Image (cartoon, rainbow, N blue to C red):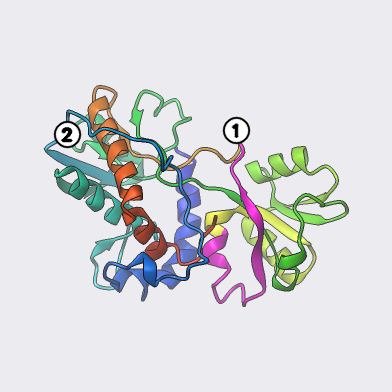
Amino acid sequence: MPRSRPLLQTIGRLAAGLLALGAATLGPLSASAQEPSVRVPNFWDPKAVHDRPSTIPDKIQFLATDGYPPFVFRDQHGRLTGFNVDLARALCQELGSSCALRIKDFEVLLPALDEEEGDAIISGLSRSLPSTRRLNFTEDYLKLPARFVVRAYNAADFNEQALTGKRIAVEAGSRFEAFAKRFFPEAEIVSLETAEATRDAVKGGSADALFGDGLNLSFWLPSEAADDCCAFAGGPWLEPGYFDEGMAIATRQDDPERAAALTYALRQLHQKGIYRELYLRYFPMSFF
């Protein structure tokens, strides 16, 4: 099973309350109306010139799983919404293709793609699994960095390059633990059973910082559970082999043209500012 699924489940629980009366009911947002200090990631070279592919699909039937806010979920009126939903719609508009989204259980997304029930999966599949290595993937449209979180009053003074003696909470068995033990040898790494336990540790003061999933933490920090205790510190960590694999759209092995067209459209959405608007709409606290 793709490792993205439990991650999206955790994020979904944190995001649901924040988005229930927010992004689910909002119309298109203007990037200029957002706080200028919010950092929106850029995964594409702004100076690169990319020609429109000669082969553009007339239609794209996307496959996804719902119940994973802020990516794909139902709003209070039962309507399908989310970052991936709006992104798929924007991609089709950019390409001039007709667009549809079919909801499937996560376990049957790959069989549904193989059986041509859809043309592309937009549901956070991992490239590294044996079952997905045969697929074509677009470039990543969202990366999932690691971040440090500290008590809010310590954020301005926290130096991620000077961790000697610092107690760093990490989730046991995670890639965050593996990375911290390898690259932060001067710190005291505190391995805890769950991600929730790491959040409690930094909130309660038994850890000086936690090192974990930035996307997950971006929904915890403004939540009631965090109670304004904490803040991001330092920058995003996207080190290869640990945090470099992001979210991409998958197509069948015999359909590279569709993946190429979608990659082109993703770049165009970024250049036109549409990606920025979607990011600010569904991720009210940037995790970059």
Q: Does residue 205 lie above or below 278 as drawn?
A: below
Residue 212 appears left or right of 222: right
Residue 74, how many percent across, how many down?
A: 29, 64
Which residue corresponds to mark 2? 56
Residue drawn at point x = 55 percent, y = 72 percent: 222
Q: Earlier in the sequence, mark 1 or mark 2?
A: 2
Task: Check disc 1 and give the amino acid type.
Answer: Gly
Q: Is residue 147 magenta?
A: no
Residue toward you, 53 or 135: 53
Residue toward you, 66 or 24: 24
Residue drawn at point x = 33 percent, y = 67 percent: 30
Residue drawn at point x = 66 percent, y = 45 percent: 176
Which residue corresponds to mark 1? 241
Q: Which residues make up the magenta segment?
A: 217-239
SS for dot 1: loop
Q: Is residue 26 visible?
A: yes
Task: Check disc 2 and give the amino acid type.
Answer: Ile
Q: Does residue 103 lie above or below 277 as drawn?
A: above
Q: Quadrant of the N terminus?
A: top left
Q: Which label is found at residue 184? A: none
Residue 66 appears left or right of 188: left
Q: Nearer the viewer, mark 1 or mark 2?
A: 2
Residue 145 appears left or right of 155: left
Give how far apart the Cα atoms at labels 1 and 2 are: 33 Å
Q: How crowded is mark 1: few (under 14 residues within 10 Å), some or many (20 or more)?
A: few
Give the tally of numbered discs.
2
Residue 288, how many percent across, how many down?
A: 55, 55
Q: Does residue 270 lie above or below 69 as drawn?
A: above
